Image: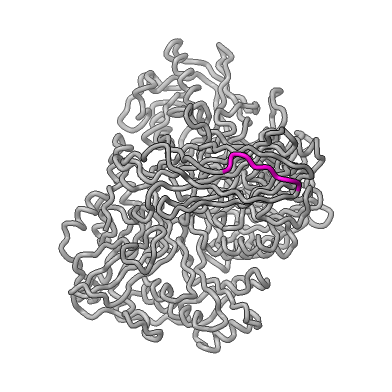
């Protein structure tokens, strides 16, 4: 096994001032993971079968596998109905009842069913009373028999898809509407960044004749900016509510479909689909607000209830319904982290794309968690994965200093609806040494009674700070950030006083005024002002970073998704500013609609994607970079979409992106350049490097990917290609791009840097063809050598140790333990817990069972397409229970998984390295356990 440094020392180093909290939090994380994942240890019965399509969600806590639920895809040759198929299953075993959740019956896209198994219909209690294990084992045996049928093509698990999470900055008051200051102009501020304004005014394109489908949380179609109704003659004329308001993903019986996709929810999680719809197609006369393609026909397929998540079988069903309804474009502002393109929803999205439907999908909001974090289904090969760039302005209320009339933008916390005017004092008068402001054990520098209290963000939760301030007599808390000039939204749940936030720059200015003059009278206005965003035109901090695990470049393109003004349901104020790739994706979907109106609704989706990438504008790197000015393609894709240039552009490059893989598997890449103009063009070519991304910092975090992924090095690739190309009208030529070398050797402490940039082509004669470009990327080093398991993992423990130890102690306990015992007597511990921390995704994870001589006798667990773990509490480790059952080497389809005889055994965990050859033993990272005694 390759040794890797543990990330935990780095984790605690970053949190050393709150070490006690961090350690308790990790213990809680392990317990949470157990309850989510403890039931998946017997998946090897299914994993051995070639028709089983495992996905990463089944072995990580990114999603929850939904027990008893499966998607069964029929073979193309099967001519029967779903009802006939189910009847055949029940005829095989009349004790088993199948409930069909969804029927998929679209030739060339997907034919099959999503089913629910009722456990009580086939479960028989076992002698060892391990009900959960035996229930799952019986269930998997049933599914195994299903896969043996010749007319079954594939079987997938049904997994949970989390509700889209966005950052909310401001919303209108439901009673008074928008209170706009006189300085507000040109809503929604984004169209000048993307040339959409020019497409509207100069080309007169508004999306006429194009149908855009949206799969989301529903829509308030009574909103006047969205047409005021539903059905023929209205803007939103297509769609369906697949679930109903009270849908609970864990209870299939809670589905109550409704004929229209109306969002009537009043919870804070609602309104997402209405915001997305407005970005695409709003026409608002009151505030002169226009969506990207206001004349498109919209469809909405609702797959979320008022609360909670949804499932991948619903996502697939909604995509098929939107395809069958005739949508030219389908937008999905949803997904989950899974950087393997084999996810079933990504597979279906690819199939729909091949039928000339442009699939536009959010890349995800995991940008703070490092590399390989793009969401599926945007990982599909033929879809458009969309990153987010921050808008130029936002709408925010301001507070005013009564004496100086200075104004500072603020944002209310998640549970604060109104703020109070009053006098401001600081909790601490020193802005440099107050990271623990208002945390337990600290004392304020000033009398807080009756004042609004200025507090610096950091170390403890906002609710904790608010209680500390309230206990000292403060009437409200104003939090300022630790750095930066942009405001943020504090997350509170039980704060006893109003909480709002301001930027670091604003906080320092108010602190200096407070120290100088004492209590400062301030007033909070609810009127919304046009506030400049300091990160305008840069990749949003939350935008997920690629690439995929097969080193495909994702995301593909960027849209404006940070600080986006759009519609909300009327009961939520009708308008609001949200941030997320959820907002960037519909923006690009709207641009696609403009393009299809100009060039034909039947345009090949891959041609459209290439064209958007060819004419995108490269996004600058964040920070004051003098050496390399462009951001990495694994953050921005081709760049920020430019609608006018893409529509008018006469040069086309395909593919619109290239990947050189790693340096061991490197080979030159070729693109085809076509002159679509009626005049010859001469192009000059130039390499424009982007900043590299440094996934690792061995001296601090070992091989745990750095979160977020930094760009501190300056490595660039020296490329070789023709310097000029001349093309006659309608002529195509191939261009080969190769790598001569790199500007420097990687820092040994920062291995496997991901380099990239853009190859720019500009017209030497300055004709109307414009400037085009395409992005490239690659990795320095042999990625097969990157460790999969963290140091000390996998490890074996039990529930008692799991509860009572933090991470250090748990690893030490595992190292000090000489053997583990599984007792099958009633009342004893009849299973052990296996804890795994994946530093990198793996295509294949196997737990072999070895006898006392360490000879292979069978397999305990097998899983495919595993997503890596992060430092986030919800996905730091994976935990499975194992009770001493296995599948023998000579696999018997009838006996399946069997209990071990009493004796001494070992588990040998194997993970296939990135780009590894499964037949080569050197491609597997291997760890063998200490003796396990079964008695």
- Residue drawn where x is 62% and y is 59% of the image: 303
Does 665 lie within the magenta span? no
Residue 305 sits above or below residue 507 on the image: below
| Residue 672 in view here | yes
Residue 508, position in %: x, y?
A: 45, 20
Residue 617 sits above or below residue 157 on the image: above
- Residue drawn where x is 45% and y is 27% of the image: 483
- Residue closest to the eye, 538 or 669: 669
Residue 558 picture quarter: top right
Q: Which residues make up the magenta segment? A: 722-729
Residue 830 horizontal side relative to residue 356, left or right: left
Residue 76, position in %: x, y?
A: 62, 77
Residue 480 horizontal side relative to residue 566, left or right: left
Residue 546 horizontal side relative to residue 785, left or right: right
Residue 313 picture quarter: bottom right
Residue 319 sits above or below residue 542 on the image: below
Residue 179 sits above or below residue 866 on the image: above
Q: Quarter holding the N terminus?
A: bottom left
Residue 436, position in %: x, y?
A: 35, 30
What residue occupies the far right of the structure in this picture?
A: 233
- Residue drawn where x is 46% and y is 35% of the image: 496
- Residue closest to the eye, 825 or 169: 169
| Residue 365 in view here | no
Residue 31, position in %: x, y?
A: 34, 56
- Residue closest to the eye, 900 or 202: 202
């Amino acid at each position: 096994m390759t040794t890797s440094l543990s990330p935990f020392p780095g984790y605690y180093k970053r949190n050393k001032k709150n070490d006690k909290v961090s350690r308790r939090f990790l213990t809680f994380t392990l317990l949470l993971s157990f309850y989510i994942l403890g039931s998946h240890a017997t998946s090897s019965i299914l994993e051995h079968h070639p028709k089983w399509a495992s996905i990463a969600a089944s072995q990580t806590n990114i999603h929850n596998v939904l027990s008893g639920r499966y998607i069964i895809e029929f073979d193309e040759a099967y001519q029967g109905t779903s009802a006939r198929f189910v009847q055949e299953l029940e005829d095989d075993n009349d004790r088993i009842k199948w409930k069909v959740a969804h029927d998929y019956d679209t030739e060339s896209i997907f034919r099959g069913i999503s089913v629910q198994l009722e456990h009580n219909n086939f479960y028989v209690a076992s002698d060892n009373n391990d009900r959960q294990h035996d229930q799952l084992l019986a269930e998997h045996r049933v599914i195994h028999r299903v896969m043996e049928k010749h007319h079954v093509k594939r079987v997938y698990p049904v997994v949970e898809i989390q509700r889209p999470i966005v950052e909310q900055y401001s919303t209108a008051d439901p009673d008074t509407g928008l209170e706009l200051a006189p300085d507000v102009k040109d809503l929604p501020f984004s169209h000048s960044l993307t040339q959409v304004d020019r497409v509207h005014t100069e080309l007169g394109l508004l999306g006429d004749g194009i149908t855009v489908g949206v799969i989301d949380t529903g829509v308030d179609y009574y909103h006047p900016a969205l047409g005021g109704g539903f059905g023929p003659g209205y803007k939103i004329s297509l769609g369906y509510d697949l679930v109903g308001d009270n849908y609970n993903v864990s209870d299939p019986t809670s589905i109550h479909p409704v004929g229209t996709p109306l969002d009537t929810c009043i919870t804070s999680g609602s309104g997402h689909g209405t915001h997305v719809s407005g970005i695409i197609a709003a026409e608002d006369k009151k505030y002169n607000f226009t969506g990207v393609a206001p004349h498109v026909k919209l469809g909405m397929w609702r797959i979320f209830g008022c609360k909670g998540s949804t499932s991948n079988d619903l996502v697939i069903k909604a995509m098929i319904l939107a395809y069958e309804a005739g949508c030219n474009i389908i937008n999905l502002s949803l997904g989950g982290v899974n950087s393997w393109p084999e996810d079933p929803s990504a597979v279906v999205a690819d199939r729909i794309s091949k039928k000339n439907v442009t699939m536009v999908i959010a890349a995800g909001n995991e940008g703070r968690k490092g590399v390989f974090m793009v969401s599926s289904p945007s990982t599909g090969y033929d879809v458009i994965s969309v990153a987010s760039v921050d808008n130029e302005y936002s709408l925010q209320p301001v507070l005013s200093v009564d004496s100086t009339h200075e104004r500072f933008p603020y944002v209310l916390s998640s549970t604060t609806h109104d703020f109070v005017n009053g006098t401001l004092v600081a909790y601490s008068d020193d802005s440099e040494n107050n990271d623990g402001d208002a945390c337990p054990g600290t004392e304020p520098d000033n009398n807080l009674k009756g004042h609004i209290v200025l507090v610096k963000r950091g170390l403890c939760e906002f609710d904790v700070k608010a209680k500390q301030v309230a206990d000292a007599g403060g009437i409200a808390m104003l939090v300022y950030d630790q750095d930066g000039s942009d405001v943020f939204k504090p997350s509170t749940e039980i704060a006893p006083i109003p909480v709002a936030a301001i930027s670091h720059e604003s906080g320092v200015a108010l602190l200096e005024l407070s120290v100088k003059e004492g209590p400062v009278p301030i007033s909070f206005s609810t009127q919304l002002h046009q506030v400049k965003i300091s990160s305008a035109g840069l990749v949003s901090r939350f935008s997920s970073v690629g690439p995929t695990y097969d080193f495909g470049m994702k995301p593909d393109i960027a849209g404006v998704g940070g600080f986006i003004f759009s519609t909300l349901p009327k009961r939520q104020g009708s308008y609001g500013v949200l941030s997320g790739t959820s907002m960037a994706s519909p923006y690009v979907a709207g641009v696609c609609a403009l393009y299809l109106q100009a060039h034909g609704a039947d345009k090949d989706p891959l041609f459209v994607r290439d064209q958007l990438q060819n004419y995108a504008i490269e996004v600058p790197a964040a920070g004051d970079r003098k050496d390399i000015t462009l951001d990495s393609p694994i953050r921005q894709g081709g760049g920020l979409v430019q609608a006018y240039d893409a529509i008018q552009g006469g040069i086309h490059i395909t593919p619109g992106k290239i990947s050189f893989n790693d340096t061991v598997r490197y080979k030159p890449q070729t693109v085809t350049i076509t002159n679509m103009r009626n005049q010859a063009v001469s192009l000059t070519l130039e390499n424009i490097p982007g900043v590299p991304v440094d996934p690792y910092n061995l001296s601090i975090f070992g091989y745990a990917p750095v979160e977020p992924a930094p760009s501190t090095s300056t490595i660039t690739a020296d490329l070789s290609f023709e310097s000029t190309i001349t093309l006659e009208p309608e002529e195509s030529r191939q261009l080969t791009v190769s790598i001569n070398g790199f500007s420097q050797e990687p820092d040994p402490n920062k291995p496997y840097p991901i380099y990239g940039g853009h190859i720019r082509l500009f017209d030497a004669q300055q004709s109307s063809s414009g400037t085009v470009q395409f992005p490239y990327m690659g990795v320095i080093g042999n990625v097969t050598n990157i460790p999969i398991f963290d140091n000390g993992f996998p490890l074996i423990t039990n529930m008692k140790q799991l509860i009572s130890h933090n991470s250090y102690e748990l690893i030490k306990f595992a190292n000090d333990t000489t053997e583990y015992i599984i007792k099958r007597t009633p009342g004893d511990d009849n299973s052990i817990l296996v804890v795994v921390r994946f530093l990198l995704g793996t295509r294949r994870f196997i737990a072999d069972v070895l006898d006392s001589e360490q000879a292979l006798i069978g397999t305990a667990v097998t899983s495919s397409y595993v997503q890596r773990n992060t430092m986030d509490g919800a996905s730091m480790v994976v935990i499975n229970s194992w009770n001493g059952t296995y599948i023998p080497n000579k696999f018997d389809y009838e006996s399946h998984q069997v209990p071990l005889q009493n004796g001494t055994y070992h588990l040998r965990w194997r993970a296939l390295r990135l780009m590894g050859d499964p037949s080569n033993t050197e491609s597997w990272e291997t760890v063998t356990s200490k003796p396990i005694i079964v008695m």
